[in-house]
Amino acid sequence: MTSPIEPRTASLYHATRAPAVEPLIAMAIVMAAMATYLAVAIVVPPPVALAAAQVALAAVAIAAVSAQHPTRRLAALGLRGARPRFLVAAIAIGATAWYVNIQLVSQLPLPERGARVLAELVDRPPLGLALAMFALLPAVCEEILFRGVLARSLGRRLPIAAAAAISAAVFAAYHLSVVQALPTFTLGFVLALIAIRADSVVPAIVAHAINNAVAIAMSRGELPELAGWLDDHAAIGLAGCATVTALGIAAVLRGRA
């Protein structure tokens, strides 16, 4: 039997911590990735500009972190397994946080044109393509950069709330949209909590993808029964979704990571 004082005990009795880049390096990577995103979005033709820019965003992060941690590049990006409770919490949060955010945004005096342009962008392509472009691809690419690189790095040096808030503010600024500022900040804050506590972006990717997918389906009228029920029972829906989101966050924060 392995003795508790032997060096390999940590990997046997609890998960080892994944490597992460230093905060200043993480911020530099994020700035470089965002600049690359904008450049690609401008240069590449419109039909594929968004997808190409998202891929470029993640590619910069992957290349930079791989140079820092060539032998553990995936772990350094947060691309590793997580405890089941984080995945369960991510599903709960992703399935409900979107409605809480919608209700919050509805209380703000936001420009209607910005919201209309965003809705038209999501509604235009076929459902499968819309989900791939606006749910799955951003969930993977943005999580690798903003949570895998930035939030996990800040979480090594700062209290978790501060690390989550800073990374969420950068995430909100990246979207360059007044309409999206509040929902991207609140979603980014929760996703950062998940990634830091799980020391993995996999649950954050799951939550992000589900959040976007449900919001897109609702925006396009693909879930008429659910939409009708929420229209008729808005207060109950908000209370229920807020409760499930809160329980998911509590599951993320409780106990050992």
Image (cartoon, grey):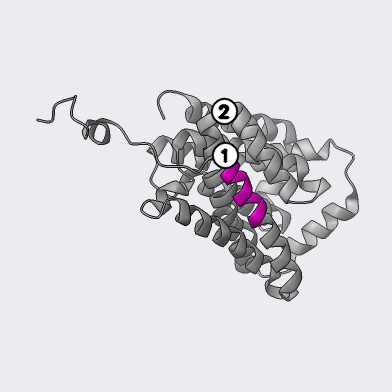
Front residue of 117 and 44: 44
Residue drawn where x is 73% and y is 62% of the image: 38
Q: Where the C terminus falls, by quadrant? A: top left
Say which of 130 and 170 sits in front.
170
Magenta stretch: dominant secondary structure: helix
| Left or right: 72 in relation to 125 | left
Residue 126 visible in the displayed image: yes
Comparing 88 with 231, the one in front is 88
Residue highlighted by disc 2: 158
Q: Residue 204 placed where, x, y %?
A: 53, 44
Question: Toward which corner of the image does residue 189 lie, by quadrant?
Answer: top right
- Residue at x 49% of width, y 31% of height: 252
Q: Is residue 214 above or below residue 125?
A: above
Question: Which residue is under mark 1?
Answer: 23
Magenta region: 24-33
Q: Quadrant of the N terminus?
A: top left
Label 2, secondary structure: give it: loop
Q: Position of residue 227 (x, y in %)?
A: 70, 48
Please tell me whether residue 57 is drawn above or below residue 172 in the rendered image.
Answer: below
Pointer 2 local density, CA inside 10 Å: few below 14, some 14–19, many at least 20: few
> Residue 195 lies in magenta, yes or no?
no
42 w.r.t. 98: above or below: below
Q: Earlier in the sequence, mark 2 or mark 1?
A: 1
